[in-house]
Image (cartoon, rainbow, N blue to C red):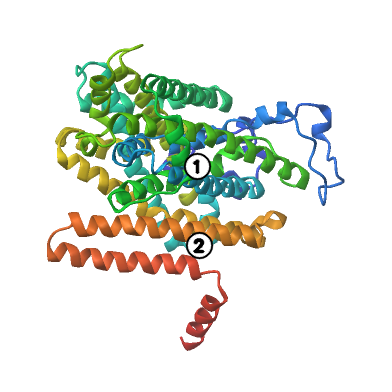
Amino acid sequence: MASRDLAESLLPVGGGAATATAHDEYDERAYDSDDKVSIAVSDSDSEDGGGGGGDAMRPAFSWRKLWRFTGPGFLMCIAFLDPGNLEGDLQAGAAAGYQLLWLLLWATVMGALVQLLSARLGVATGKHLAELCREEYPPWATRALWAMTELALVGADIQEVIGSAIAIKILSAGTVPLWGGVVITAFDCFIFLFLENYGVRKLEAFFGVLIAVMAVSFAIMFGETKPSGKELLIGLVVPKLSSRTIKQAVGIVGCIIMPHNVFLHSALVQSRKIDTNKKSRVQEAVFYYNIESILALIVSFFINICVTTVFAKGFYGSEQADGIGLENAGQYLQQKYGTAFFPILYIWAIGLLASGQSSTITGTYAGQFVMGGFLNLRLKKWLRAMITRSFAIIPTMIVALFFDTEDPTMDILNEALNVLQSIQIPFALIPLITLVSKEQVMGSFVVGPITKVISWIVTVFLMLINGYLILSFYATEVRGALVRSSLCVVLAVYLAFIVYLIMRNTSLYSRLRSAMTKST
């Protein structure tokens, strides 16, 4: 009895719980119905508009409706602007100049395709990717997918929190040490919970302000340093890649696709009230979310372009090019460009702080959906936020206490964290493409064969890119026969799990399973 009372005290209070079935009452959902944003802008929006939604036409375009749908895409695009991406941008600009801008463009396009599929899945099914994985795969595979996604979240969050801590250290003129910045950043989950209590739109507005701060900060840097417009355009349209810039190229592509962001976007789109029983309403939601997501990614691309070109103009071909990182980037900019309008060191730090804070809070948000969806944990928001935050803050505090950001060991750690996230990419993309390709899951919104083929090509390409990153790290940083042999065993299990996820819904897998069943 006591355990039941404890469980009930940790469950969220929902207005519709009394009338729900026992199954629905205790199933985790991304948003309670009372928390969702109403889309209707007129009386006609409450009507079917198509006789039950069979082949109903999508309602006419409305700017007011686009505004109502605006929000999830901008939260999603923050993963394209986290400190890890900014570091990849500045290193690419310093090492390769304007040469890799075309790759940044196409990496963003590939990221857009993945995120649009994620949004489509969430809208069409009314469930997010973690929930659907729990229903699609056996328990052992579900637990493995959850563990992999949590590892990716922890890896991303360590970099994001460290990025925020570096910004705080710069803005405080070194008064606040790195570990102090980590402690300050740890409390951002309370900001998240405070804003969430005031509704989804207030939370989205807060993130909109942080994105605007980034855009203004890096646009000012762009204006002060005055990169070449001609070389910028050539870099965007003329593909160039040399053996010296392969590492930076892989870093650009690897940073764009964040595993947890795929799960996050499929949940964020459920923050709007959409009648999934009416086809026209689902079509409308997919349409507006596509527009909103593309606009958000255009903004993120502009910010990434600003960072890359600023460092291309200032440091390409210089002695400092190989040693630039998040912490010393501002100092190098200050030495190079001084204080033409405002100390560029602090402009950089303000943009970095906005990047770190926004990405750590969205990481907390994603962690709630991932944990709740995979494990079907229906806990109160504050408890889920604290659990999710602890996963990242504890290892980050250890990093802050034992590593100096200027120590070469930190660079190795950052590279290891990039590899850690790269390893997880197949465990987000393969389930996503598998589910959006299943008519039993998507109904009439299942993706077509062309989209399916393109999606698999992008997935294989990203897996190969990140495989190169993993092998490069293994060859240069892993030492000792015992460690190497142990990692080979882990790699074999890892590859076997990927093959299982790919083959699971094929006829070959069905025949093999049938044969094994008969033999036993």
Q: Which amino acid does label 2 sit on?
A: Tyr
Which quarter of the picture shows residue 48? Answer: top right
Residue depicted at 44% across the width and 38% down the height: 79
Total tally of numbered discs in the picture: 2
Q: Residue lying farthest front?
A: 230
Q: Which quadrant of the rendered structure holds the N terminus?
A: top left
Lower position in the chain sequence, tag 1 or tag 2: 2
Instruction: Choose between 491 and 91: the one closer to the eye.
Output: 91
* Secondary structure of the residue carrying numbered label 1: helix
Q: Where is residue 162 in the image (x, y as percent from the top left)?
A: 28, 32
Mark 1, Cα crowd under 10 Å, few <14 / some 14-19 / many 20+, is many
Instruction: Choose between 237 and 207: the one closer to the eye.
Output: 237
Q: Can residue 72 be seen in this view?
A: yes
* Secondary structure of the residue carrying numbered label 2: loop
Q: Residue lying farthest right?
A: 51
Is 468 located above or below residue 503 in the figure?
Answer: above
Q: Where is residue 43 in the image (x, y as percent from the top left)?
A: 83, 28
Which quarter of the picture shows residue 293? Answer: top right
Q: Where is residue 361 in the image (x, y as percent from the top left)?
A: 42, 31
Q: Can residue 369 be seen in this view?
A: no
Q: How far apart are marks 1 and 2 (CA)?
A: 19 Å
Instruction: Choose between 487 and 130: the one closer to the eye.
Output: 487
Q: What residue type is labelled 1?
A: Leu
Can you tell which mark lies on residue 137?
2
- What residue does disc 1 label? 264
Is 331 located above or below residue 265 in the figure?
Answer: above
